[in-house]
């Protein structure tokens, strides 16, 4: 079994973890009601997707 001979330093560990960050989700605009929504999802405000009403909203 392979065992490291020396302990890795904090700099090595932190530089490896430097890319472990969260990114904000992309946001698009609904063409019907012009509110922000997630891409490829039904709009929560008007219920439209791809020009068709999918969910009835009151």
Image (cartoon, rainbow, N blue to C red):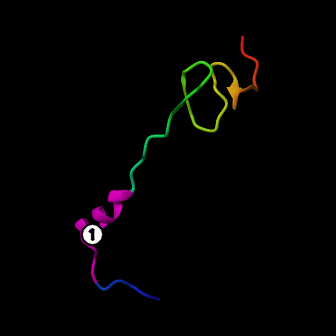
Q: Nearer the viewer, residue 21 or 39?
A: 39
Along the viewing direction, whichever of 33 and 38 lies nearer the viewer: 33
Q: Find numbered disc 1 in the image and state the secondary structure of the residue it sits on.
A: helix
**Dot 1, how many residues are within 10 Å of its Cα: few (below 14), some (14-19), or many (20+)?**
few
Q: Quadrant of residue 33?
A: top right
Residue 39 lies left or right of residue 17; in this view the side is: right
Residue at 66% over, 19% down: 46
37 left or right of 3 in image: right
State the extent of the magenta-drawn residues as a range: 6-19
The x and y percentages for residue 12 are 27, 69
Say which quadrant the C terminus sits in. top right
Position of residue 52 in the picture relative to residue 45 (left or right)? right
Q: Is residue 6 above or below residue 27?
A: below
Along the line of sight, which residue is nearer the eye, 26 or 7?
26
**Who's the residue at 28% across and 74% down the image?**
8
Q: Residue at x 69, y 30 (%)?
A: 49
Left or right relative to 5: residue 55: right
Residue linked to disc 1: 12
């Amino acid at each position: 079994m392979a065992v490291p001979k020396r302990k890795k330093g904090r700099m090595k560990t932190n530089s490896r973890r430097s890319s472990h960050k969260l990114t904000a989700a992309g946001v698009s605009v609904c063409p019907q009601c012009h509110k922000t929504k997630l891409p490829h999802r039904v709009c929560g405000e008007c219920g439209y997707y791809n020009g068709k009403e999918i969910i009835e909203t009151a």
